Amino acid sequence: MDFKLDQRLEKDTYFIGELTLSRVLLMNVSNFPWAILVPKISGVSELFELDSKQQIVYQNECNYISRHMSEIFGAHKMNVASLGNLVPQLHTHVIARYKDDDAWPKPVWTFQNMLPYSDDDHKLQIDKIRKLIDDYEQGENYARL
Amino acid sequence: MDFKLDQRLEKDTYFIGELTLSRVLLMNVSNFPWAILVPKISGVSELFELDSKQQIVYQNECNYISRHMSEIFGAHKMNVASLGNLVPQLHTHVIARYKDDDAWPKPVWTFQNMLPYSDDDHKLQIDKIRKLIDDYEQGENYARL
């Protein structure tokens, strides 16, 4: 597989782990619990460019991370979005939002005061999400494909 | 089915048509070709709250609309997002973006100068997307479920 992570994603994130199809990253913004999933397939910019099996696996992985981030972070709402206006490599933001977070109720992307993690804090955050990845089992939708 | 469209979505959009699971709406913002898909299921706020079959059908429908809006509008990028900070009823934005549109490269939601459609223009836009709905056939993923 000749997948290579986009340079901007590389620069803005920490590596957390790998699911079947997705690399899971932590956005280096401490204001919000913010993961990014990137399918490890080169040359894909849009969700509909994944083949039908990849679409299901990728969606399962995004929904799995979203469900469990919602639980472990006690989020009021999850924001799940594939935008890609700045980074053409297909990636999906999975962000835990709170009614009293710094940007609520606006989306996070235009928030002006993003603060990077301190060294210790990013490790704690990575460990929480890595635990989810370790516990991931491919679901029944995958088994059918 | 006791589905009822959220009042704010009702107010901000035009009805385009129905897919198997989704009601398809046109956002009344003429700056961007902007559809919203709402699964016709009551009490669901998060993608992961759909059951596994609904997740696949809903994703198929979102990706179908995204793929064909990309084609008919000649978009440079599609933005696909389920946010729901203001409207808790699960809905997904599918927006055709251009490198010279009014908000590029920012997401559209915080754009300050949203302009409603004129009467004739909204009808033209609805007709384009309704054509996609008329042509929709449930794909192979659905047949397997």
Image: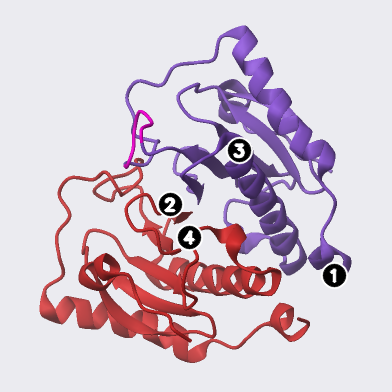
Chain colours: A red, B purple
Q: Nearer the viewer, mark 4 or mark 2?
A: 4
| Callout 3 amino acid | Ile
Chain of the residue displaying label 2 = A
Q: Is residue B21 left or right of residue B121?
A: right
Q: Residue furthest right?
A: B143
> Residue beneath label 4, please?
A45
Q: Nearer the viewer, residue A88 or A23?
A: A88
The chain containing the residue under callout 4 comes to A
Q: In terms of secondary structure, where does tag 4 sit?
A: loop
Rendering coords of residue B27 (x, y %): 56, 28
Residue A130: give x, y in percent of width and height. 38, 85
Examine the residues drawn in magenta and state their main secondary structure.
Answer: loop
Residue at x 79% of width, y 67% of height: B141
Q: Residue B144 location in percent, x, y? A: 86, 71
Q: Report the residue at 37% width, 39% height from top.
A: B99
Which residue ends up furthest to the left in the rendered image?
A118
What label sits on residue B36 in the rendered view? 3
Q: Quadrant of residue B10?
A: top right
Asked whether the beta carbons under mark 3 and mark 1 sit within 8 Å of each other, the answer is no
Q: Nearer the viewer, residue B101 or A132?
A: B101
Q: Nearer the viewer, residue B136 or A14?
A: B136
- Give whichever of discs 3 and 1 has the lower sequence position: 3
To the question of a shared chain for discs 3 and 1, the answer is: yes
Q: Which residue is mark 1?
A: B145
Q: Is residue B13 left or right of residue B39?
A: left
Mark 3 and mark 4, same subunit?
no
Mark 2 nearby-residue class (10 Å; few <14, some 14–19, many ≥20): many
A141, above or below A27, in the image: below
Q: Amino acid at mark 4?
A: Ser
